[in-house]
Amino acid sequence: MRRSVALRLSAVLGVAGAAGAIALGLPQHEASAAANAATGFASQNGGTTGGAGGTTVKATTGTQIHNALCTRAASNTPIIIQVEGTINHGNTTKVSGDSCNTAADKIELKEISNVTIVGVGAGATFDQLGIHIRDSSNIIIQNVTVKNVKKSGSPTSNGGDAIGMESTVRNVWVDHATLEASGGESEGFDGLFDMKDDTEYVTLSYSILRNSGRGGLIGSSESDTGNSNITFHHNKYQNIDSRTPLLRGGIAHIYNNHYVSLNESGINSRAGAKARVDSNYFKDSKDVLGTFYTDAAGYWQVSGNIFDNVTWSAKGTDNNPAGPNVVSNTSVSIPYSFTADNASCVPSIVAATAGANTGLKVSTGTCSVTSSPSASPTSSPTSSPTSSPTSSPTPSPTATSGTNLSIGAGADGSSKASGTSYGNVKDGDVSTYWSPSGTTGDISIKWSSATTVGRINIVEASGSTGAIGAWQVLNGATGAVLKSGTGAGSISFTATSTTKVTFRVTGATATPKVAEFQTFAS
C-alpha cells in the first residue's frame, strides 16, 4: 500500500488526539454479556448470541483469555470472557486443551463456537495483537480496541489484520470496537477487518476504523467469491486509503456509515459482488463507490446517500467509479428488517455511538440515540450473564384477545431447568412454567403445518415478573429474527406463516420463568 496514510497521519492524529481527550470523559460501561442484540446479517442463519447462557470469567491477559477457552467442557460450551486492561505479546501465550486451539502471537478463536469477548471496566486494548477467527461460529466481540497489528516488522500478529476471519466462519458480530493502524502496507500494516475463505453472516456495527491503508476485504482474490451476507452499519471510517470494504462476490449491506478522508477509493465492489449502499455520509473523499483496480465488474444499489466534497476519477479499463452521477446498477434484497437514520444526521449519530468505551449507545433509527439496555455495570464476573434492561418490563397476562394458537400445539426448547417442562407454556395454566437451565435459553411453539402468527404474549410466572430482559422472536423454521426488544408481555410483529415460533431470552436479571407462551394470528 502507498505511504499516503503515513504522510497524512500527523494531521489526523492531532484531530484524533483531541477526540480521544473528549472520549475519556465518557462513562465506561461494562456488561457481563454482550448488550443489545445482533443486527444485520449476524441476526440471520439462527442468530448470533455468542456465549449467552454460559459461565462468565474475567481476563486481564491474553493467556487468561486462551485459558478460559481451553478449560471449557467442550469447544462449543458457551462462555463470556470479560476483558480489562492491555492484551499484548508479553502476556499472551499458547494454552493447550481439548476445547481450544490457540497460538502465542494472536488471540486465536479457532475451531470453537459460542464465545463472547467483551471489554469491561476501564477498557480492553489489544495492542499490536490481532484477533483471529478460523473455522468457528457464533462469536461476539464487543467494546474492545485493537491497534497497530503488523504483518512485517516487529512484533507481527495475525497477518497484520486487527480482526481477521477465514475458513468456514459463520455468525460473527463485532460491535462498538475501535480498530486502528498507524499507516499502510509499507509501514507493516494490513487490513483492519478482513473476511475470506467461506465467511458468512457477519455484522460490523458502531465501530471506528481509522488511520490505515486498508479498511478491510471480503474475499482474498478474484476467485475467493464464496464470502457473503455481511452488514456494516453506524461505523466511522477515517483516513483510510481504500477497501471500505473491498467486496469480491457475495452480498454486503452498507448503511448509516460515516466516511471521512477516503484517500484513494472506498467501497470497491468487484468480481460480481453486490453492495446495497443506503443512507451513508461521505465527506472529503475520493472515488467512494465503484469497481477499482480490476476489469471484473461489481454492482451496487444506492439510496439516500450524501456525497459532501467527494471527487471522482475518470472511467477506464480498470476503473469504474459510480459517480459523479451515482445511480443503482442492480437490486439487492435484504432478508431482515432495519430502520436507517437519514443520512444528514449520520455524522452526529455515529460520533455519539461508535467505538469502544462509548457506553454501548445505539441509534433509534430516527436520528436520536438510546443507551444500551445493559446500563448497570457489574464489578466482578458472575457465573451467568447479568445484563439487564433499564426500562421496566410490562408483562400483559391478560393480552389474550383472539384465539391462542398455542393450546394444542407442540413445544420444545434449547434447555430447561430441572423440574420444568416445555409443555408448561402451552397448557393454559399460569401456575406451571418453563425455565432455562441458566439465565438465557429458547422456548418454542410448533405446529404440524404452517400457521400464521403475528403476535405473541409472554406471561411470566408469579414471583418472577420482570426477570426477562433482552429477547428475540425467531421464525423457528428459518432462523429469521422477527422482532427483538426487552421485557416480557405482548409482542407484535409482521404476520408470518411458519411451523415454529421461538422466543429466545438473551438477557435476564434473574432466572426467567415463562408460565405461558401464547401465540395469535394478529
Image (tube, helix red, strand yellow):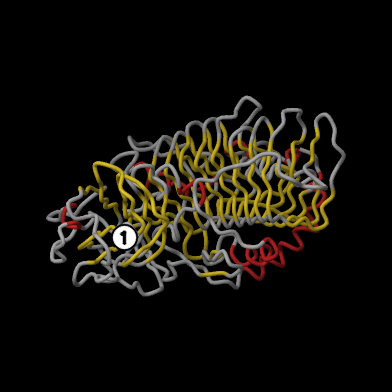
Residue at 68 percent of width and 45 percent of height: 244
Asked if residue 1 is positioned above or below residue 461 in the image, the reply reads above
Indicate the position of residue 506 as horizontal and vertical percent values.
Answer: 36, 57
Asked if residue 92 is positioned above or below residue 84 in the image, the reply reads above
Total label count?
1
Indicate the position of residue 52 as horizontal and vertical percent values.
Answer: 36, 53
Residue at 45 percent of width and 33 percent of height: 135
Indicate the position of residue 38 as horizontal and vertical percent values.
Answer: 46, 53
Is residue 489 visible from the viewing direction of this image?
Answer: yes
Classify residue 480 as left or right of residue 248. left
Occupied quadrant, residue 33: bottom left
User: In terms of secondary structure, where does tag 1 sit?
Assistant: strand
Crowd band around label 1 with a 10 angstrom C-alpha radius: few (<14), some (14–19), many (20+): many
Classify residue 372 as left or right of residue 479. right
Classify residue 394 as left or right of residue 214. left
| Quadrant for the C terminus in the image | bottom left
Determine the residue located farthest toward the bottom in the rendered image: 392
Occupied quadrant, residue 235: bottom right
Identity, as a three-letter code, of the amino acid under mark 1? Ile
Residue at 66 percent of width and 27 percent of height: 222
Q: Nearer the viewer, residue 210 or 345?
A: 345
Q: Nearer the viewer, residue 171 or 54?
A: 171
Q: Nearer the viewer, residue 67 or 445?
A: 445
Residue under pointer 1: 456
Indicate the position of residue 239 as horizontal and vertical percent values.
Answer: 75, 52
Determine the residue located farthest toward the right in the rendered image: 314
Is residue 64 visible from the viewing direction of this image?
Answer: no
